[in-house]
Image (cartoon, helix red, strand yellow):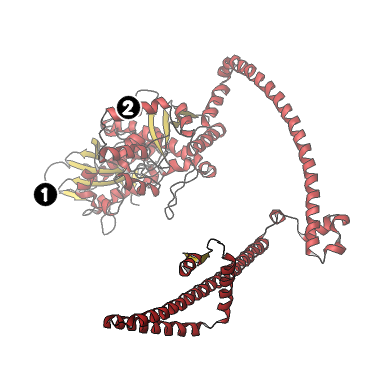
Amino acid sequence: MSTDSAKKRKTKVIRSDGGAVEKEPRKTRGDGDQESKSYSEEVEVDTRDPAKDYDLYKKTCEDLQRLMAEIHELKSKGGKDASAEIDERRIQSCIHFMTLKKLNRLAHIRLKKGRDQTHEAKQKVDALHLQLQNLLYEVMHLQKEITKCLEFKSKHEEIDLVNVDEFYKEAPLDISKPTFTLNDPHQQTLSRLDWELEQRKRLAEKYKESLANKEKIMKDIEIKKEYLSSLQPRLNNIMQASLPVQEYLSMPFDQAHKQYEIARHLPPPLYVLYVQANAYGQACDKNLTVAIDGDVEEAKALARPPEDSQDDESDSDAEEEQTTTKRRRPTLGLQLDDKRREMLKRHPLSVFLDLKYKDGSVLHLYFFYLMNLNIMTVKTKVTTATEMSIAISAGDLLSPASLLSCLYPGDHGKKTPNPANQYQFDKVGILTFSDYIGELGHPYVWVQKLGGLHFPKDQPHKFVVADNSLSASHMETTIKLLRVRLQSRLALQKQFASLEHSIVPISSECQHLFPVKIISRLIKWNAVSYEDYVALPFTKHIIEADVAQETDLFFSALIERGTAKLHVAIVLNPGYSTIPPVFSVCLNWKGEKSSRNDDNLKAIEGEVNVCFKELLGPKPGHQLLTNQIQRLCMCLDVYLETETHDNSVEGPKEFPREKMCLRLVRGPNRIKPFKYNHPQGFFTHR
C-alpha cells in the first residue's frame, strides 16, 4: 500500500524541446509531508556528490544482481528453508530498488537544474548578442550618417557666385564685413550668398520692369501689324494698277518681285547663280535675262519636314491590302534602278539665262542642281533670228554636246567635278556619269563656279558650301566667253555653207592678204570623225604631237588645180577662233607627197599653222578658217608655178608662171617663196 501511494505521489517529468519540465502531482491529504520531502531531496542534491551517487548506483546494481542470482538458485534447489531465505533476499532487493529510485529522482533533479542553468545562460548569451547587434546597427547607422554628411552638397555650391575680389570690391561693407569674413571661409561664403541674394532681388525687379516694357512694345507691334496688314491690299491694288506703266517703261517690278519670292526656295548653288547673274545683268549686260522655272510647290514640299504618321484609315487600308494581296518583292535590278533615280534626282526648280545678240540670236542656258550629288549641270539651246542655211558639215557646231565644250581649256563636261560622287556611284552601280548627260546636262567646271561650288581634288568632300565670291569672280569672264563662242559658231555655220558649195568666202577687210588671181579652187569640204582623221597617213605627226583630241571637230578638204590635188585635214578646236585650226596637207601630183617627205609642203603647213596671226582679220577673228583655206590655194599656185619644167616633155607647161617671185627657191632645202607682199604684189621668202 505504501509503495502504491508513493507511486501516485511521485512527481512526473514531461520532456519537451526546451528541456524536462517537472509536473507537480495532485495534492492529497499527505501532501504537506511529501512536499517537504521533495524539497529536502532538492536541497540534498546540492550537498551530494554526483560521483559518489554514481558509485552507489553501480554497487546497488551489483548487489541486486547478486540477490537475484541467489533467489534464482534457492528456487532451483526448492528446500523448505529456502522460502525464508528467499523472503529475506526479496526484502533486501526491495531496499535496493528503493535506493535506485532515489538515485533516479536525484538524477532527474540534477538534469532539471542543469537544463535550467543552461537555459538561463543561453538567454543571457542571446540578450548579449542582441545588444551586440543593436550596437553594430547603431554603428552602421552612424557611419552612414557620417558619410552622408561628408558627401552633402549644399545648394550654394551650384550657384555661380562672383569671385572673392569682385565681392569685396562691389559689395557694401554691411554685407561683405571684411573684418570678420577675410579669415573665416564660412562667414565669407554666407556673406557672398547674401550679396548674391541682394543682386538677384535687384535683377528680379529689373526683370519685372523689362516684362512691363515688353508687353508695352508687343502692344505697339500688334498695332503696327494691323496697320501693315491693312496696307498690303492697298499696295497690291497700286501694283496692279501700275502694270501698264511698268510694261511701257520696261521696268517689270511686279514680275521681279515674284521671281525674288520664288528664289527663296532655290537650293544654295542655284540661288548664288541667280543673284550673281541678275546683278551682273543689271550692272554690265542689259541683254542678259535671268529667270526661275520649275514647280514651286514641290520645292516647298522638299523644305518641309516629312510627316511622322498618316491617318488611322490609311493605316487600316494598308493593313487590309497587305493581308488580302500578295506583293512581289522587287528584284535587285529594280532596287538599283530606284536608287540610281534617287541618286540623280534634280531639284524641282531651275535657273535659265538668255544671252541675246545684236543679230537677234539667243543662247538659252538651263541650269539644274542634282541634290544628292551636290553638283550643277547645264543644257543649251540656240535660237536664231533668221532661218540659216543648214550645212551638212556644220551638224555638230550648235549641238548641245559640243557647243560649250572646252569653254575653258580641258573642261569637256563629261565627268562629274565632285570627287565624292565616284564613291556614291559605286554604291548604286553607275559606271560613268557620261551615260546620263543627255538627260541631266553637262557638269562643266565653270558651271560649278558660277554656282559658287569648288571641289578640291586632294580633299574630297561630299558637301561643299556655295560661295558668292567665287561666283562673282567668274561671272563676267564666263559670260563673255559664252558670247564669243556662239558668235564664232554662227560664223562657222555660215562659212561651212559656202565651203560645201566650193566657195571660200573672203571679207573685204581681208582681200589685201591675197593676190587678185588665185587659180586653185576648193573642190570638196566635209566633216570626218576622229577615227577617220587618225587613219589618214599624213596626220600622224599631228597625232604624235598630241594636238588633236577626241573632243575637237575634224574636217577634210580637197583643193585642185589641173592634175594636182591637195588633200587637206583640219583639226578645229572648240575654242576657235581663240585657238587656231591645225592643217595637215598631202599633194597628189607626180606621186604622193606630204610634209614628211617634202619640205615645201612642210613650209605650206607652216604658212597656215604658224603664221595664222596674219590671217585673223578684223576682231574677233572669225574669218581665220576661210583665210587659211584661201592661203592654201594661193600656196598651191606658187608651188605648182615655181616647179621646174621637164624639157624632155613637149608642149606647153601645165602650170604657167603667173605669180611674180623675186627668187624661185632658196637654201639647201630649195624652199619656194610663199609669202605674199601687199601692195607690191610679189612673193618672197620668209
x and y, in percent, of residue 653 in the image: 17, 42
**Left or right side of 312 for 226:** right
Q: Nearer the viewer, residue 343 or 526?
A: 343
Rendering quarter of residue 458: bottom left
Mark in front: 1 vs 2: 2
From this viewpoint, is residue 9 visible? yes
- CA–CA distance between discs 1 and 2? 105 Å
Question: How many numbered discs, if any?
Answer: 2
Which residue is at a point 83% across and 59% down the rendered structure image? Answer: 168
From this viewpoint, is residue 19 visible? no
In this view, 294 is above or below 405: above
Q: Nearer the viewer, residue 595 or 462?
A: 462
For label 2, the SS is: helix
x and y, in percent, of residue 632 in the image: 28, 42
x and y, in percent, of residue 70 in the image: 33, 84
Inspect the image, locate mark 1, and give the three-letter code of the amino acid beneath it: Ser
**Left or right side of 12 for 216:** right
x and y, in percent, of residue 190 in the image: 79, 57
**Left or right side of 340 for 59:** right
Q: Nearer the viewer, residue 87 or 116?
A: 87
Rendering quarter of residue 516: top left
Among the two numbered marks 1 and 2 on one chain, the one whose residue lies closer to the N terminus: 2
Inspect the image, locate mark 2, and give the three-letter code of the amino acid beneath it: Glu
Crowd around label 1: few <14 · some 14–19 · many ≥20 (10 Å): few
Q: Which residue is mark 2?
A: 320
For label 1, the SS is: loop
Q: Nearer the viewer, residue 214 or 579?
A: 214
Q: Which residue is mark 1?
A: 648
